[in-house]
Image (tube, helix red, strand yellow):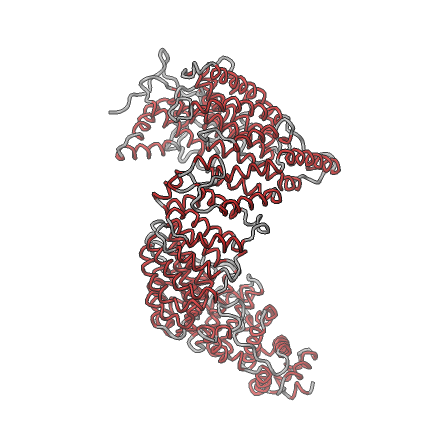
Amino acid sequence: TNPPPVPPEPGAAPRELSYVCRPTSQSRVYMANPMQSPPLGAEDLNSIYSHLSSALSQDPTVRQPAEKALEELARRVGFCSCLSEIIAKRSADVQHEVRWLATVYFKNSITRHWRARPDIGIASEEKVHLRAKVLELVREDSHQVAIQIAIILAKIARLDYPKDWANLFPLLMGQLEAADELATQRVYLCLHHVLKELSTKRLLADQKNFAEIARFLFDHVWGQWNSDTRDILAVFAGGGEGTESAAFKVTCERWRFCLKALRRLICFGYAGDARTLQEVAAVPVVMPALLAALQQLLPYWVHVRDESHPLHNVIAKGILKLIKTAIEVQTSHPWSCTHPDVMPKWLHFSFEQVCAPAQPRFDSFLILNMILLQNALKFMHGNATALAAQVPTSDAQGGGTAAGRAQTLASLRGQAAHLYSAFFDAPRVMQLAHTVVTQYLPLTAEDLQSWAADPEGYYHEQDILSHKDSLRPCAETLLLIAMQSHRDALAPSLVHLLNTVQAQPPAVAASLGAYAAASEGAGGVPVELLNREAVYNTVGIGAYELHDHVDFAAWFHGHLVPELQDRHASTRLVRRRAAWTVGCWVAKVTPEMRPTCYKLLISMMEEQDMCVQLSAVNGMRALVEDWGFCEGRFLEFAAPCFERLFALLDKAAELDSQLQVFNLVYILIERLGEKVRPYANTILEMIPVLWEQADGQSLLRVQLVQSLQHLVSALGDGCHMAYPILLPLLRYCTDPRQPEALNLLEDGLQLWHETLLQAPNQEPQLLPIFPNLPAVMALTTEHVKVCLSILESYLLLQGAEVLSQHGAAVVETLAALFGAVNERATMMIFPVLDTLLQCFPAEGPVLLEPVLLKLLGIVLGGKESDMMVASASGVLSRVMLQNSAAFGQLMTKASAIPGLVPADKSSVPVLLQFVDVWVESADSLCTTKARKLTALALCTLLVAGVPQVLERLQGIFSICTSVVYEMDGDSDTVPPGYEYWVTHGAPSDPEERNMSGESLRRKQLDALDPVTTLNLRKVLGNKLAECSTVYGESIFASAVNQVDPAILKQLQETSQSAPASAAGV
């Protein structure tokens, strides 16, 4: 059955919507298809209501068609106006749920369609109607619907205020004149959301608008909040009579919304005093009032602390909101808070709450008090200096003269220093630190119960707690800031505290304070152990500040070592903290202490308590990552360490534990380097097991792949022993069709490249993986660099097999890259092409013909940079030098391709155009070997039998003679392995790798390279002598005589066999 239609108002005829439904010539209405989608009107209300009702159904066959229909209706003009009419109906036959869903669709339509777009939008006439309608809907009985209406109002205000809705706030606040309690509460609810939305706009003009809003609203909101504060406190003072009434609850909600509005008006409606250096007048007025309200409200917390109490949420939220507001004002206007009536009183209050908390503790409230103290200590320690650096120096920015601002800043800094120094004197800071250590850092019975129930979960829970949400981390942060700002005062006190707990024998249950005494026997753990754990935590937190005050060597040998050796169950909390402390003090762990640390931490990894085991892993990681780690001292512990870590991986139930443990394995492999080889079999045996256990956990598998990469690098030419495990994993990680490719592909490619680099000789097992490479390069260009390196490594390792089986795919992949990647990536292709041509001088030019034609187009197109043209010419130079016949065929085919050369040069042969560009761009080559290759190829071109080449002798001779001079005499060979245009993956010094793997293959290839073996002087002399035979002595002599005499003189000096015509010049 269909839901009941929306009834008309009693006694009223069905009315049309008040806005203009059809577009006029003065206003353009945007919609998807105006001809097929007429504007919605009053006659469509029943249909929309029906769709909204169906959209609430639990039956997907009913809900999904309704949602689709509503999505289509949302694109039609008048949809929001129809929704506003449905929301306005509050009769009994209109479902509350439907009205709420209408507000949700209204809100989403505002977000999507309020801004005019070319395809869809809301007409300006309808916007006027909607703005007025939303204000009419403010007084809403349903709390859920009222919240959505407030959000709708805020979203419209963000887009239209003040340009199209300048009277928003007068209209909104005008509803308070003759309103009841509920209407007043709803107005302030809307005001809160509007201010919240507008305060997030960061443009300067928007900030100025918000400042105007603050001036308009502050007095009214401030007065209403004070009035509600008096009313609420009066009810509580009268014994709580009337707290159950609806009017009182509405008053409390309004009070809270006014407080939120005040916070935004003060924090965002006034320019920050850190830049203006002007006191915000509202701060000395509001902050004392907030503190007074908090002090009067706080005593009632003891009576309503039970969550079942009806006033629990009211008082708890009020208390927290008051101090949160104070903290935000303290952050936004730090200089204004140094007023004598503001911060001193707040600091006294927060200090008292922290040092003498009410019982039972209100943890959320204590956290906020600690944050307020933290902010004050940080401001005293360094933030004041940082804020001073933000003060504008130019007159235009800050107003007034620079000297005047400097004087004001000095006065403010002096006032702040006096205030904070007077409060945070040495006795008070010592009391604060002692309170934190003895009351907030010791583990509670709840902590010990959580630890006993789930050690692994407890460890990670403590590891991720935020200092703004949890009491102990917040207390630790407060203690650290206090140590940073008052190191000299606190260091002796904390060292004394450490000596005190160390002097307590394990059997003596001594107490450091009332809280510790009250916790005696918590969880079956003696109090002195709880105290010792807390003090160790303190010393670990302040390792940097206490570095020069603690005798770590004596502490280590006298206490930490015995505690790490103690295996009693009740001492596990001290043992866990001692392992963590060693990691914090790693800078003071001497080489002589390290073997003891390794032994004890590895022994702790054998315990049954997962929390202790993971703490040992954390301590070991700190030792291994430290710069003082020595591989030689660790080798005797490597085998048992790997064994314990792999056992721990098998035991761990949570992903975070597995990641943390395997991270240590990864670091060990990386730090040990080649010395990890004796343990490679143990590591390799665990990889398949861990891989299966990590199914669906890509982060752990990524660490496995990274660890294998370091292991393969460490194994060097012995990496073939890992192939049974490595190759299946490589095939999976580098397959872009696998579901985990997004996470594993990048590291898988790096592992693949490292495997090829270390392969000692041809490996048929590596060839079946090759098809993954073209698939990856066809899918994305993100990994083009490593993919090209992999291809080059394959060419060096087993190029013949690769080209015979996958040559077409290689050529297609390389050809597709040109034009698809930027210049930097294109430059990475040239070394690969050069390596292929160098390895296969006869077959390479034929196979790469499509690619070489593209290179020729780059050279002759005139659109690329000189570096790109010179590099592309270098590849073609290789073809000319090693296979001049193939070079000639390439030029012939290029001549038949239309559009390869610019139309204005189509009459010039392709070869001559190439030679002109080739010679002109040669100076852009940045390496000696590349220039020598060009010179040798030009020498070869001299005897190609093309007479027009003789017209270009001056450029050719200039290049050849300059390269000869660059070679420094007759020793014109190039060091093997010298790169052309980009850096290869091989090491620059092959001796460092004992000439194994790819470095050896590259050296062997370079040893056979004509560029390395040929003497340019001799080649030049021989080719000059041959020219007389090819062209005739008279023709060649005539061409030589056209060359600049200075170049001919250089040629005569460098050439060992210059022609007679040249010698006679």
Is residue 462 shown left or right of residue 165? left
Say which residue appears at 59% left-offset and 51% top-offset: 548
| Vertical order, 152 against 990 (above or below) | above
| Vertical order, 190 against 33 (above or below) | above
Residue 948 in sight from this viewpoint: no
Image coords of residue 201 (percent x, y): 54, 34
Q: In front here: 646 or 387?
A: 646
Image mark count: 0
Say which residue appears at 43% left-offset and 19% top-offset: 249
Image coords of residue 74 (percent x, y): 39, 32
Say which residue appears at 38% left-offset and 46% top-offset: 570
Image coords of residue 629 (percent x, y): 50, 61
Residue 356 in sight from this viewpoint: yes
| Vertical order, 695 against 525 (above or below) | below
Say which residue appears at 31% left-offset and 32% top-offset: 66
Is residue 423 shown left or right of residue 500? right
Q: In front here: 468 or 917?
A: 468
- For the C terminus, which image quadrant? bottom right
